[in-house]
Image (cartoon, grey):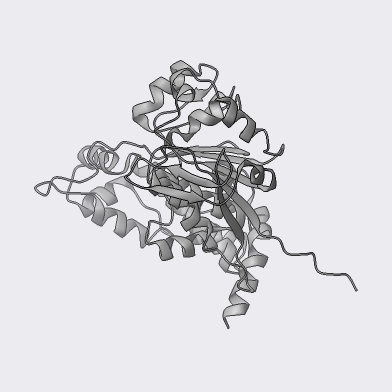
């Protein structure tokens, strides 16, 4: 009889640097500290370390935090996350690591997944880990990042970028989007959505969504596209024309399209495709419906069309996606019965 593999949660080590933002430091602990498997075991083990021996680390607020681990624990990480800090010194000013920080990063094993929230990206860039790779940061710091690190492909217009083993996000709340994305990538939409519900945040904002939307809070005197989006979400399985969405708000197609982009940062067509991809992911994980039926129910019409969109968005086929996440969700469902 074969023995069950020993369970070991994925270790996330958060690197706390002087001048850190407490909100961003707390994001990985909140998001990765919630997911559990079918047996109720935590899927992640989240710990915090400093570049120095255990002790206090300054924040940008009027308090410090007590960190219990030194940099050596970075050697045990499966994922390392670098939140933003306002005291990066030569990293932010000249694009070079301090000896202390370089020594700390030297503990990280090859192949460890790396992520940065907001200007934490400067640490990865100064270490040469982003050369020739796409990255993002807070829109207000993107130009500086590009000037300081010309070999980095900086995209200032997105919430986060997943480049496989290195991920970067824009500022503040985009760090939540990034961490939820990693949970979704590791364990599927059902697990990530459960974490989002418990955290009371939107379950999914696509990484390619614009950081800065010109009218995030509509003028109360102006019509919005909220009702049209709710209408569309209720009938994703049907053909939806732009003119039909515009009609829900009694707008011309031109006005509706402009207003929609101002409010969401994407076109109506892009938004619809993203919602259908999310619907397809949910159905592939949670139902036994055939790929053809999932394609129809998600509004793609044909399996070939859905296959192309999932391949573009996720890099996998519907069958491969289901194979990856379905067994875990079946086990979790059984444990709740």
- Whether residue 185 is visible here, answered yes or no, is yes
**Quadrant position of the N terminus in the picture:** bottom right
Residue 84 in the image: x percent, y percent?
Answer: 44, 38
Residue 233 in the image: x percent, y percent?
Answer: 36, 58
Rendered residue at 59%/39% (across/down): 114
- Whether residue 273 is visible here, answered yes or no, is no
Between 63 and 301, the one lying in front of the other is 63
Give the vertical position of 205 relative to 161 (above or below).
Answer: below
Tally of marks:
0
Q: Quadrant of residue 172?
A: top left
Q: Residue furthest left?
A: 221
Between 70 and 267, the one lying in front of the other is 70
Give the vertical position of 257 relative to 41 (above or below).
Answer: above
Residue 35 in the image: x percent, y percent?
Answer: 55, 63
Residue 161 in the image: x percent, y percent?
Answer: 50, 37
Between 276 and 215, the one lying in front of the other is 215
Q: In which quarter of the image is residue 337?
A: bottom right
Q: Is residue 83 left or right of residue 130?
A: left
Q: Residue furthest bottom?
A: 337
Rendered residue at 25%/53% (across/down): 226
Q: Quadrant of residue 119?
A: top left
Q: Is residue 261 left or right of residue 323?
A: left
Between 279 and 144, the one lying in front of the other is 144
Rendered residue at 79%/64% (across/down): 5
């Amino acid at each position: 009889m074969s023995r069950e593999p020993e369970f070991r949660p994925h270790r996330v080590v958060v690197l706390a640097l002087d001048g850190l933002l407490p909100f961003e430091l707390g994001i990985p602990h909140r998001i990765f500290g919630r997911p559990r498997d079918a047996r109720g075991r935590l899927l992640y083990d989240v710990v915090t370390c400093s570049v120095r021996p255990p002790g206090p680390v300054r924040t940008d607020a009027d308090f410090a935090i007590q960190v219990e681990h030194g940099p050596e624990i970075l050697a045990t990480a499966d994922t390392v996350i670098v939140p933003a800090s306002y005291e990066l010194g030569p990293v932010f000013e000249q694009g070079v690591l301090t000896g202390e920080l370089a020594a700390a990063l030297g503990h990280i094993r090859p192949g460890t997944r790396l992520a940065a929230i907001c200007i934490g990206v400067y640490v990865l860039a100064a270490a040469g880990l982003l050369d020739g790779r796409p990255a993002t940061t807070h829109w207000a710091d993107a130009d500086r990042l590009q000037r300081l690190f010309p070999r980095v492909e900086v995209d200032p217009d997105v919430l986060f970028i997943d480049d496989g083993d290195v991920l970067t996000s824009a500022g503040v709340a985009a760090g939540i989007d990034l961490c939820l994305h990693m949970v979704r990538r590791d364990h599927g939409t059902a697990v990530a959505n459960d974490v989002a519900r418990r955290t009371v945040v939107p379950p999914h904002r696509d990484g390619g969504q614009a950081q800065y939307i010109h009218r995030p809070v509509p003028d109360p005197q102006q019509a919005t596209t909220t009702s049209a989006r709710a209408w569309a979400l209720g009938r994703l399985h049907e053909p939806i024309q732009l003119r039909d969405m515009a009609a829900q708000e009694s707008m011309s197609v031109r006005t509706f399209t402009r207003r929609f982009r101002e409010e969401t940062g994407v076109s109506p067509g892009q938004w619809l495709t993203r919602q259908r991809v999310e619907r397809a992911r949910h159905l592939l994980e949670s139902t036994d419906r055939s790929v053809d039926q999932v394609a129809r129910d998600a509004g793609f019409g044909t399996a070939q069309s859905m296959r192309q969109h999932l391949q573009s968005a996720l890099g996998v086929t519907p069958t491969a996606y289901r194979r990856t996440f379905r067994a875990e969700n079946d086990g979790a469902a059984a444990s709740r019965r």
